[in-house]
Image: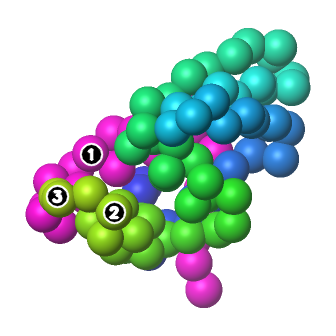
Amino acid sequence: MLSSHTSITAARETVFSDLGGEVAILDLRSGEYYGLNSVGALVWQILQAPRTLAELCREVEAAFEVDTERCMRDMVVLVGELRDRGLVEFSEAP
């Protein structure tokens, strides 16, 4: 279950390349590539170190004009999709 205290980090079995505002991610286990737009690219950069959902939203809100409620909804969807693809890992923050 994802909560504002869940720690999220990029999976170790990935590599990525910044493509001028977008990001291409390679899952080394499956050999599949994924692309993220500018918002997703920022999220990916942030998740190179563990962040809680609340911390992630604060950083996204600072970079883009988005309110907290919408940011939380959008980040839950995005990180959920990334987790479903094995690109991020969740753990409960201490």
What residue sits right under mark 1 in the picture? 74
Q: Which mark is residue 66?
A: 3
- Mark 3: give few (<14), some (14-19) or many (20+) Cα within 10 Å: few
Q: Position of residue 22 (x, y in %)?
A: 53, 32
Q: Earlier in the sequence, mark 2 or mark 1?
A: 2
- Mark 2: give few (<14), some (14-19) or many (20+) Cα within 10 Å: few
Q: Position of residue 49 (x, y in %)?
A: 69, 66
What residue sits right under mark 2 in the picture? 63
Choose mark 1 or mark 3, whichever is in front. Answer: 3
Check the picture and name the quadrant holding the C terminus.
bottom right
Q: Quadrant of residue 56?
A: bottom left
Check the picture and name the quadrant holding the N terminus.
bottom left
Q: Which residues are magenta?
A: 67-94
Q: Is residue 80 magenta?
A: yes
Q: Position of residue 81 (x, y in %)?
A: 46, 32
Disc 2 element: helix
